[in-house]
Image (cartoon, rainbow, N blue to C red):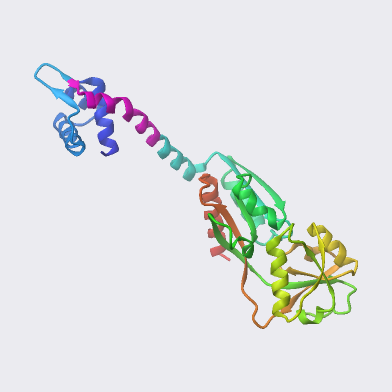
Amino acid sequence: MTFNQIKYFIKLAECLSFTEAAKCLFISQPALSRQIAVMEEDLGTPLFVRDKKRLKLTPGGVVLYNRLPEILLAYEDAVQEASSANQGFEGSLRIGFLDIYDTTEIFTDLIRSFQKMNPQIQLSMERFPLGELPKKLYDKSLDMIVTYGFSLFDQPDLLTASVQDFISCIMLSRDHPLADRAELSLEEFKDECFVQLGPRSSEEGYQYILNLCARSGFTPVLRQVEKMEDVLLWVQTGEGVAITTNRTIERYSPHVVIRPIRMSDDEKHVISIAWHKNNYNPAVAIFHELLEKQLKTR
């Protein structure tokens, strides 16, 4: 059945007259008769009893007449929602950002554009630690997250898109003897204490640091902390160094410097945006489409 046929059937069942139903539907009576005949043929059962005096529904026709209007209404609602999504969806969008990610290069202008184009969508933004972000997609407290791509590798049912490349860097106190060097190798810090979130706070980040140091030929001495603020606190006082990226807000601190790390086989790392595949919030698609357009112009 087509949705036009459903409309024709419902109107004919209401009128019980081909002539009257055809007038209401603005089609000819023969055209309506053909559509109903095709519908009955496709279903393999008669829907109307026709005689010279009157038209009436068969028992099967009564069943369809009781059920099809709600199907048609659901279809019309879905079409309206799709149209509303393209023309300006009214709803909300909740985005979580990695707590140390510097959003200014990509997301400052994007957020402004999104809100200007979609003032009817209530946007909320909040920062979270690395380990918490994927969990908030699964418990539906966030619609989208922006985080390190490596933290999403083993997360099922998430859709992701690359936003920005990043490179591994070393963060050290401004008073550190190597602070004036433009570029450093990780091996130069093999005897230093590395300040790092512990596995309880971020298993992915913890393993990332261990693997990075292992590729440079050493096992780091670690001071494990619970929050990124504590990493910065220890490093700026000269009580350790930390591995970070060139996309971190920590680079704005006047008390530390962040330098690229020379790695002979350094991997390409990305900042990613992610959302759950079963999240059907239209605002997710609207935001992602706007993000893609902005990235293409960069």
Residue 274's x, y, as percent? 58, 56
In this rendering, the answer to whether 161 lies above or below 135 is below
Query: In the rendered image of this protein, does residue 276 appear above or below residue 164?
Result: above
Magenta stretch, residue numbers: 56-76
Say which quadrant the C terminus sits in: bottom right
Q: Is residue 171 visible to the viewer in this orientation of the structure?
A: yes
Please state which of residues 284 and 135 is positioned toward the viewer in this rendering.
135
Q: Is residue 45 left or right of residue 117?
A: left
Magenta stretch containing residue 63, yes or no?
Answer: yes
Figure check: 278 above or below 75:
below
* Magenta span: chief secondary structure: helix
Question: In the shown orientation, is residue 108 left or right of residue 189?
Answer: left
In the displayed structure, would residue 95 be above or below residue 229? above
Q: Residue at x 79, y 59 (%)?
A: 228
Give the quarter of the figure containing the N terminus: top left
Viewed as shown, does residue 218 lie left or right of 27? right
Q: Nearer the viewer, residue 110 or 195?
A: 195
Residue at 53% over, 59% down: 292
Say if residue 183 shows up in the picture.
no
